[in-house]
């Protein structure tokens, strides 16, 4: 006999692992904010205010961090260099207070394969209405704090 909680966890896992039929499923609006060398300050996401450099992407819950990296590189020429790191964080509204919180969800590197390349928005527990904050670090800059070292293979 399984509990209701165990059933919900199994159901949720089955839903997140299924690929989205992109021909039949309407895409969601992903609001992305990029910054060079560091993440935006969480205080920039307050009471209707947002950082000014918004990138709007229409995508699906099965979009991977590698796929989003490619879309950001299309519109940001400075981010196209091999060895550029993309540090992804979710910005989500606080449930009990009027602010937001930021949670790191993964890192990709242009020109290298990494362990988190195939992580999807769904696997990162993205919810429609969340924002994506990306710290872009070009190869000629120092590594940002908290970067996971050694998880990338050159290709």
Image: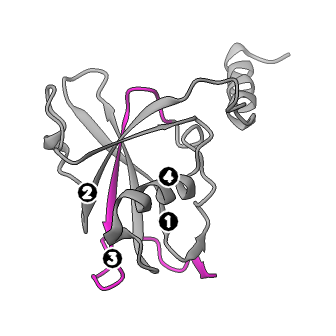
Magenta segment: does it hold 105? no
Task: Let me know if residue 143 is in the magenta part.
Answer: yes
Residue behind mark 2: 39
Is 131 placed above or below 110 here? above
- The mark closer to the camera, 2 or 3, is 3
Q: Position of residue 56 (x, y in %)?
A: 36, 39
Choose the circle earlier in sequence order: 3 or 4. 4
Q: Earlier in the sequence, mark 2 or mark 1?
A: 2
Mark 3 secondary-structure assignment:
loop
Earlier along the polypeptide chain: callout 1 or callout 4?
A: 4
Pointer 1: residues within 10 angstroms few (<14), some, or many (20+)? many
Q: Is residue 119 above or below residue 37?
A: above
Q: Nearer the N terminus, badge 1 or badge 3?
A: 1
Number of numbered labels in the structure image: 4
Instruction: Look at mark 4 in the image and give the residue it sits on.
Output: 68
| Helix, strand or loop: magenta stretch | loop
């Amino acid at each position: 006999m399984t509990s209701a909680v165990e059933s919900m966890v199994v159901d949720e896992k089955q839903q997140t692992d299924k690929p989205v039929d992109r021909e039949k499923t309407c895409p969601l609006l992903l609001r992305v904010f990029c910054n060079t060398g560091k993440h935006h300050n969480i205080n920039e996401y307050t009471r209707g205010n947002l950082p000014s450099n918004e990138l709007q992407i229409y995508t699906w819950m099965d979009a991977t961090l590698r796929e989003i990296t490619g879309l950001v590189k299309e519109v940001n020429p400075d981010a196209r260099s091999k060895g550029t790191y993309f540090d992804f964080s979710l910005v989500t509204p606080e449930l009990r207070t009027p602010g937001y919180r930021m949670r790191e969800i993964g890192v990709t590197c242009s020109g290298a394969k990494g362990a988190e390349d195939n992580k999807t928005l769904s696997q990162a527990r993205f919810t429609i209405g969340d924002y994506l904050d990306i710290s872009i670090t070009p190869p000629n800059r120092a590594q940002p704090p908290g970067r996971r070292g050694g998880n990338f293979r050159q290709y």
